[in-house]
Image (spheres, grey):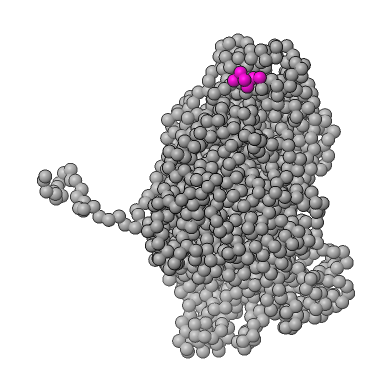
Amino acid sequence: MASPSGRPVRIGLVVNPIAGVGGRVGLKGSDGAEIVARALALGAVPESGARTVRALERLRSEAPAGSVELLAAPGPMGEEPARAAGLPARVVGEIAAGATTAEDTRRIARSMAEREAVDVLLFAGGDGTAADVLAAVGTSVPVIGIPTGVKIHSAAFAVTPEAAGKLAAMAARGARLRVAEAEVLDLDEDAYRRGSVAPRLIGYLRVPQERRLVQARKSPSPAGEALALEAIAADVVEGMEPGRGYILGPGTTVRAVAERLGVPKTLVGVDAVRDGALVVADASEDDLLGFVGDGPAAIVVTPIGGQGFIFGRGNQQIGPAVLRRVGREHVIVVATPWKLASLGGLPLRVDTGDPDIDRSLAGDLRVTTGYGDRAVCRVVA
Amino acid sequence: MSEPRGTEPHGAEPVGAWPIGPKPMPRRFHQARWDEPIIFELSQPGSRGVLPPPVEPGILDAVGDPAAALPNSVRRPRSPALPELPQLHVVRHYARLSQENLGVDLNIDVGQGTCTMKYSPKVNDQLVRDPKVADLHPLQDASTVQGILELLWRLERFLQEISGMDRVTLQPGAGSAAIYTNVAMIRAYHASRGDAAVRDEVITTVFSHPSNGACAKTAGYKVITLYPDADGYPELDALKAAVSERTAALLITNPEDTGIFNPRIEEFVRVVREAGGLCSYDQANANGILGITRAREAGFDLCHFNLHKTFSTPHGSGGPGAGACGVTQELAPFLPVPTVELDGDEYRLDHDRPLSVGKIRPWYGIVPNLVRAYAWIMSLGAQGLREVAETAVLNNNYLMQQVLRIRGVSAPYATGRRRIEQVRYSWEELARDTGVHSEDLGIRAADFGTHYWTSHHPWVVPEPMTLEPTESYSRTDLDEYVAILRRVAQEAYDDPEFVRTAPHASTVHRADHGPLDDPERWAVTWRAYRRKTGLDAR
Amino acid sequence: MASDEEPVGAHPYIPNSGRAVREAMLEAIGASDIEELYADIPPSLRLGRPLDLPAPLRSEAELVRHVEGLLARNTSTREVLSFLGAGCYAHHVPAVCDEVNSRAEFLTAYAGEPYEDHGRFQALFEYASMMGELLEMDVVNVPTYDGFQASATSLRMASRITGRPSVLVAGSIGRDKLSKIRDYLAPDMTVELVRFSPATGELDPEALRAAMTQDVAAVYVESPSYLGVVETRGEDIAGIAHDARALLVAAVDPSTLGVLRPPAEWGADIACGEIQPLGLHQHFGGANGGFIATHDDPRFVMEYPSRLFGITPTTVEGEYGFGDVAYERTSFAIREEGKEWVGTAAALWGITAGVYLALMGPQGMVELGEGMMARTRYAMDRLAEIPGIRLPFAGSHHVKEFAVDLTATGRTVAEVDAALLKRGIFGGKDLSAEFPELGQSALFCVTEVHTKDDLDRLATEMEAVLR
């Protein structure tokens, strides 16, 4: 991702200026002009601009002089925060006067990726903004998210605005950064506002990973995320029984299993394989019911969405009827040790919509964390 | 005497406050910064540091130069490109490097939690420099080494009493080597019962030392890791879910690296033993429980100690340490060879043990450290060891109370309960507020002449810091350490940039880690560095 | 063994053990007594009685007297003439080595960062660098426990790199090291011995060729061997290994590398060995460090379980910083993705070995190697003159150790060594159990500390004993 030596790193900046405006005044999110108007009427002050400035100030202080070429979306979508942070920027794209829209975000982000060929796209907003960026650029360019919104679930965001600025500066310094895939979830807005939560996994963004400062250790280095995925995949594949069908849930950890089998994987969907061959791609619940009707089956899933849900977030196609057919003992949960650690001791969760099935899945479960490695985790309904 | 003079135009002398003002806390430390070149850069061709004894004419006349008879394919064609320095320059170079190092002797080393950085008494260092320790060959006839054999035998018995186990071996090179030795004996035990193929799983916890899992893996086992409940204790139900007829052993550290003692440890052992598995007790954190509770009473089959932790032997900048394994009589046949035996009043080494796991290292153990550990125990006795444990635990809880008054830090798990030997803290709140990470704080602590350690991976506790005061530090030491942490934490809020760019008063400035992960730039040796940067004229 | 009475005042090693301080601290944390702090430990687990240990020697004078009293029953190699080796060697330890490794900053430090503990990082980087020159290899680990571990780990690395489960080991390997290797390589790997030539003591290349299969990850050879013999067919051995796409792992004695060609130059992919000869006292076998060295190939670098310290810039130009290279190891050897383990090993000895090499310099290492060869040849020649004594590998090259066959004298090694002991000499190690094919043979070690008088005396006494 580092630019060839000598040329400054080209960073695109796209800010959703009204992200998070609802949160402080108790309104969930900020999608929809009506919500925005209500929030502003309630005295909400958009915070995303200020947070963007924090990120940019960090970028300015850490990036060597002349190492950054900043391209900013117009006005509050980038140009103004850049000026406030003291960073010269070339303005890219046009917006109409007045409130900006998600379409503005998508259009300008796409232009930065395709026409301007930025090396990395720095964006500010919430999950909704991440979804817009995903729609615009997919995995064509690495992105760094400055968190400003209220409903931040996605791992596409750095932990603080300063951390986002620091990552961008590392890219500017030509650091070799590992790029990982981060889930992008979106909530069904109306359902969320009615109080029920049903997030959809809509895709993955490529996000540079900061190498955490390595403390002097007396213990071995962790094997590394990439190796852990391979190890998990090797373990699962080695344990696959001939004649048994395997339902493969979404996520990069399960994708590693598919890669080891040599079959394509729908990253945000569910696929079904048997005897090393793909049987159904991007399966619906009906597809899966048919699949488990054809013979013995098992399910391979990984926690999605940061709350530790193994069923009910992003993989609702694996519905209660499918689970009833397969049975708890043929559910294989996979997760790297870092994934489990990031859940911070929280239990794994299930929310299939059927309380009986949920109860049947609750209890202690062995999670595959490596080759020959298991962790015992509590599952709660 | 003349009164103090004011400023004068020439040769002005400084006038200081009288009496001399109080010292600020934290102190105005600055580490030695010698900007010392790599030793190769100090080379002066033709210099000699020390001269080997010359071959006497009588030998030369008799045999000539046998090296000249070596075939070219075997003879070294050019002398090795080692640096050439006069002796004083070698002394000076390493003296300077040593000043760019801390150590327990210099700093309030409570930050290296789980390492048990206690005082290593100088008298013990002196004892091991005696030629009657340092210049013994391991193959000498037993009659010429009765003294050292007796010392080892007695040390084994001390550790048997301290652990409650029936037999002890002092062979392992350090803690992880001791864990591996225990795993090897577990493997041999099950193999002797024909169970090797069936019992292929080992259970451990995520807060036990990672070597428990890693050594088991190395020995061919699958590893099941228990994650803690919300209170930080490993769960009995989770253990029951993990135990089966495939269970070879439970390897568990207790108290765990969080400083929390699992009160249900006896039940854990019972569950595993009922399933036919063995239980091995990682006593790396034993310092706080010496004389209070033992492996035996909890039902363990094996245990191990780190002598460079609990028993005061120095850490040597990363070793050598020394390890000890204790086993029940049932497992004694599998102990590594040789064992130290007493026949009448003669000590000897017994190599004739057909069921032994064999050699786990050359010879008999890290003898200089075994002598130090022996002397340390002899200087303290039962009452002294009890004082060690109680004071270490008192220090730990006192330190915890002071640390928790600092803004931005917390001690997850077992809220409101006391800890044993160490505490794992979290700077998550501070990190969220300021963007400063735990590692940054630890590095800024170097500017005050100390440091701290975060945690093993994976980081279940976010932004971790693990502190272990042991019994060696005074109340004022602990207060000073807390003052340093408080200062550094406050700086994170007031001037995070300054903390993130630390150290500022240390031996060097913040390193760029980029080259270390890049195969084209990483350099483990000076020759590799010169080659890859093009500085090499060769 | 009785326990003692209640002591008065704080113990010198326990500042807060005095009653007043204790009570103040308990009060500060709101605890009424120490017992409260142990609330998590159930009564059933309490020992409930004092440990049964000897009465303590709280004064330093008593302690020293006691320990010295024990040690007085030892006879050190300074007091007699010793020819013992077999992996633990009596070389001269320069005073500067002892000076540096007794400095408190190096002795009492542990795992600090390369800032406050910059000194040990630089000292270990320099050790690795000097070893790199000795071995002509670019990557050398921070020392592991000992030479046995280095050999065992090198073989596991070879297995991970090649994906193969078997190793062929030179049959002259010492049985203790072999025991360690067998244990450490179990259960995934197999170890097969390849015979050595009875005439030369060197590994038999034809036997190696016959034993080679596609399952072999590595050929393991030592030079000088355990029996003291220098391998002269190293290039052939490397060829046989490489032709089968196996690796060559060579264990060497660093004190001989002033005169012997480093294994990298005769085809070794991994070099390993023991650093005890480089400035470490014998310590009854209790001072060891193991080195593992390879070329700078990421495939190999990624397989090291040890730490590797690399040099790196800081924010100030011209400053040397250090850190861990390739912190996240990656590999396709899934089964061992934990890369064995890393623990406290032998850093202080690594620093010491660096000091030794810096003191000796190129010329010192050459003189050391050549000098040992001359003294060893002299000793061999003198002993060979004694009736009944045969040197099984007389025609081979030796540096510091050689086998002596006493079978024809009708005496056992045990008897002869016992007789020599009475005359103030520690004779050679008894090989008769390890290598029965060599009959009543002993392994004698000669280093630079032996004088002509010493060697003459050995011959004279040996002759007297055998008469």
Q: Quadrant of the N terminus of chain B?
A: top left
Q: Position of residue B402 (x, y in %)?
A: 42, 64
User: A242 or B242: which is nearer to us?
Assistant: B242
Q: Residue at x 11, y 46 (%)?
A: B2
User: B82 or B9: which is nearer to us?
Assistant: B82
Q: How many marks?
A: 0
Q: Is residue B22 above or below residue A16?
A: above
Q: Residue at x 61, y 76 (%)?
A: A132
User: B172 or C299: which is nearer to us?
Assistant: B172
Main secondary structure of the magenta stretch: helix
Is B156 left or right of B95, judged from the image as shown?
right
Q: Quadrant of the C terminus of chain B?
A: top right
Is C4 left or right of C191, judged from the image as shown?
left
Q: Is residue B529 above or below residue A67?
A: above
Q: Which residues are magenta?
A: C419-424
Q: Position of residue C199 (x, y in %)?
A: 78, 21
| Residue C29, image quadrant | bottom left
